[in-house]
Amino acid sequence: MERTILHCDCNGFFASVECTLRPELKNVPMAVCGDPESRHGIILAKNERAKACGVKTAETIWQARRKCPQLVLARPRFSEYGRISRQINQIYRRFTDLVEPFSIDESWLDVTGSRALFGDGKRIADRLRETVRQETGVTISVGVSFNKIFAKLGSDYKKPDATTVISRENYRRIVWPLPADSLLFCGKKAAQTLASFGVHTIGDLAACTPDFLTSRLGRTGALLHAYANGLDESPVLDGRSLREIKSVGNSVTFRRDLESRDDIRRALRALSESVASRLRRRSLRCWVVQVGIKDPALRVITRQKTLAAPTHLARGLNAAGTELVSACWNPGAPIRMLSLTGTSLVPNGAPGGQLCFFDAAPGDDGREERLESTVDVIRDRFGPRAVTPGSLLAEDLGLDGLHRR
């Protein structure tokens, strides 16, 4: 039986929610952004009036205001966005049990088994658009297709508040003229590599041989070739089932750029303590530590290393993070944002690490375990600032909120 897959994408989700909560914003160009005073000056979402002025998601506030001087800015309210997102997904579940959230404002639905009750994919999509709009005030665009990749392309194809059907009969006409980087998982670097040998559209991708693309892009090349030809068979997973935690991390965009080694040391200390505490709360340890660095020009690099043994202690995370930053960052070069993440997670008690005849295994210091766990208890009881490293007492970087995340 041919599958019917929907991809539902909320239009300008954060801005749409703000406009439902504050109706006066519907009649002005508006955008949701972070806190400019804390240098989170990026446009997160905009309404149609702002879009008509050329305002784009992910550009800086000053760029947006240069295009649209009358732009009204709203600070994000993530708890409200999460509440509306859950409400919308509950609407989707009236039509099918197979609802897979892809982000806070996107979900795939497999409605193959629902067609006898609600009609074909387009009819279900149109009914979903009407129901979501009436009950939440948010509009959605829906792609309807026979696989997840083309369904997502369909939801992007026409906005706002639209349904696009991509079938086996029309996908070559609709999909193949689109830019190659419209395809899910074709990132900027892959698109640049493809363009260097004349592949600019999804149709160009489809016309290449899998071997040729694999020789240029590795396994990603073969995957993109299959997607371009409509060969995606991945299932829609029930998002209500428990999902494995893939990583635990935190990031900070600083009140001022990090300039010195002491700045970086303080930032990594705070991030390591936060991530270690969150790992312990989940009874997890990480094998891999990853750092991300963003400079003032918004360029980002990431580096990672595998530990000798899995850990959930701040000392091990901090040592790995410091090593990674020292190896890849020029001293004195300013840092705007820093992240530290533990990945390749295993539960407490899982075997790991090299056995040692003389000392405890790396990352298995019982005294340090007891110390950090005691600090967790104190912070839980008396607040996140009840125990603070001396090096962080007078910091001016904006690290005080890490232990509340």
Image (cartoon, grey):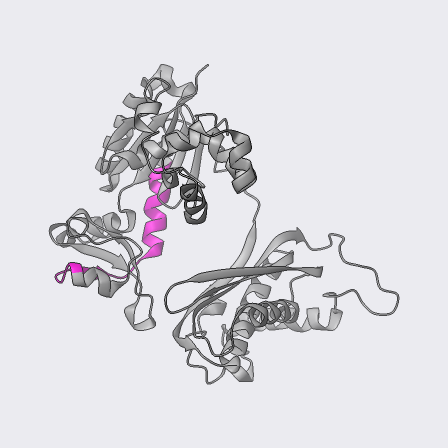
Q: Residue furthest right?
A: 357
Task: Identify which residue, 90 or 279, lies in the foreground.
Answer: 279
| Residue 339: x %, y % from top left | 49, 64
Number of numbered discs visible in the structure rendering: 0
Residue 183 in view = yes
Relative to 180, residue 127 above or below:
above
Residue 93 is at least partly visible in this image: no
100 drawn magenta:
no
Task: Give the extent of the magenta segment.
Answer: 67-89
Decide: is 346 above or below 106.
below
- Asked if residue 283 lies left or right of residue 52, the reply is right
Q: Residue at x 59, y 69 (%)?
A: 327
Residue 400 rendering spot, x and y as whole percentages: 45, 74
Q: Residue furthest front?
A: 197
Quarter where residue 259 is shown:
bottom left
82 is within the stretch colored magenta: yes
Front position in the image: 297 or 20 = 297
Residue 308 image position (x, y, % from top left): 73, 61
Q: Residue at x 46, y 75 (%)?
A: 333
Of residue 91 and residue 10, the one placed in the foreground of this image is: 10
Expressed as whole percent of the image width and height from the top left, the position of residue 324 reads 59, 67
* 232 vs 389, nearest the viewer: 232
Left/right of residue 269 with respect to residue 104 in the rendered view:
right
In the image, 207: left or right of 322? Answer: left
